[in-house]
Amino acid sequence: MIEMLSKESKHLYDVINTESDLACVLIATSYLDYALASLLKRYFIESSAVNKLLDPPSGALSTFSGRSDLAYCLG
């Protein structure tokens, strides 16, 4: 399965498997947050309002919790 991953994903996989537990949690959570923001951005219409919603620290969907809740509600 690892052979099918992109170069960046393989690097992430390697880092997660060699770092401390805390570093793994922080890196993986950050990656998931970024991936979720990217998926939501592709789902939304093209608008400057989308950037305002997703951009930290003041965006309504700038937190992982907000993004994951919205993704859940969208199905």
Image (cartoon, rainbow, N blue to C red):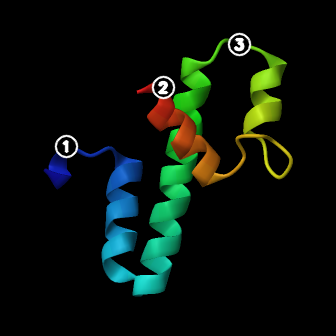
List x then y, in percent, for residue 37. 59, 39
Which residue corresponds to mark 2? 74
Label 2 Cα crowd, 10 Å radius (few <14 / some 14-19 / many 20+): few
* Residue 63 horizontal side relative to residue 33, left or right: right
Query: Residue at horizontal 83%, vertical 52%?
Result: 57
Using the image, determine if residue 13 lies above or below residue 6: below
Mark in front: 1 vs 3 = 3
Q: Quadrant of residue 21?
A: bottom left
- SS of the residue under disc 3: loop
Query: Residue at horizontal 60%, vertical 52%?
Result: 64
| Amino acid on which the number 1 mark rests in the picture | Met
Mark in front: 1 vs 2 = 2
* Residue 17 horizontal side relative to residue 46, left or right: left
> Which badge, 2 or 3, comes first in the chain's sequence?
3
> Which badge, 1 or 2, comes first in the chain's sequence?
1
Label 1 Cα crowd, 10 Å radius (few <14 / some 14-19 / many 20+): few
| Amino acid on which the number 2 mark rests in the picture | Leu
Which residue corresponds to mark 3? 46
Residue furthest to the right in view is 58
- Quick one: 74 or 27, which is closer to the camera? 74
